[in-house]
Amino acid sequence: GIALAGVVALVAATRGASPADAWIALGAIAGGVALVAWRTFARAGGGATAATPAGRGSFTPATWGLVACYGVFGFGYILPATFLPAAARELVADPSVFGWTWPVFGVAAAVSTVVASLALPRAEPRAVWGASHAVMAFGVALPFVAPGLPALVASALCVGGTFMVATMAGLQEARRLHGVAAPRLMAAMTTAFALGQILGPVAVRFMPAQADPMRAPSLAAAALLALTGAALVLSSRRASAT
């Protein structure tokens, strides 16, 4: 879906279409996909019943730590996800060049889920989550350490190729910890992620006008991602040892 949206925007920009035309095309595609999904779920019916939460549903300090890690994930993800195409446009004005950053981001996201499920079938979800944070930290910081279009493409690959894996692994860890009571933990994690997504653009908005508004929030996000990634991997190793 991300790659398709990027391709639509790329085609619209290279053909000289207006942003309104691109929005109309994207809305039509979204409507078509929604119709297909509606028909599919309508045929499937609503026979499933919710499980009764039982056991392991209480939140502990360690559980809240996972919620905080997921919030950092949202903060780190949203900065490149929001500003990568704009940063590429500042370097290369040609839309046939800078317009590829978002399709690359989306393809990396799609491929990453398949690769992770095939290559890491027995890996601890928390360790995979932590490793995803580490790679994402590298991708978030890279454009400010080595400015240029190649760094932006590499950033798109690093962030696009890890954010869905981090999502999968984080929710798998919630299920592993709380079993059928996991939806409460998943809800708290998702709320933290959303708050992180809100804080990212807000942090950029309040940067001094004379400075690069993306630099400080992105480097801060990269540092937080690296720290939480290390914490997740270490805690996973301690759990395996015990």
Image (spheres, helix red, strand yellow):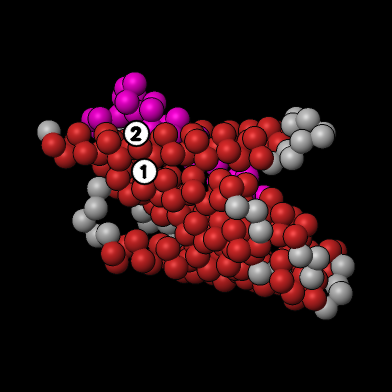
Residue farthest to the bottom, as pictured: 15
Q: Amino acid at mark 1?
A: Gly
Q: Which residue is mark 2?
A: 231
Regarding residue 208, the answer to whether it shows in the image is yes
The residue at 74%/74% (across/down) is 96
- The image position of residue 9, as x and y in percent, is 73, 68
Q: Quadrant of residue 21?
A: bottom right
Q: Residue furthest top?
A: 61
Kindly identify the residue that appears in the image at 56 percent across and 46 percent down.
Answer: 141
Magenta part of the chain: 54-82
* Tag 1 residue: 130
Q: Is residue 52 left or right of residue 137?
A: left
Task: Report the quarter where the N terminus lies.
Answer: bottom right
Mark 1 or mark 2, which is nearer the start of the sequence? Answer: 1
Task: From the viewer's perspective, tell me whether residue 144 is left or right of residue 184.
Answer: right
Image height check: is 143 above or below 176? below
Pointers 2 and 1 in contact (C-beta within 8 Å): yes
Please say whether residue 24 is visible from this viewpoint: no
Residue type at mark 2: give it: Ala
What is the x, y in percent for residue 135? Answer: 44, 50
Relative horizontal placement of residue 85, taking residue 121 as reference (left or right): right
Residue placed most toward the observer, 25 or 41: 25
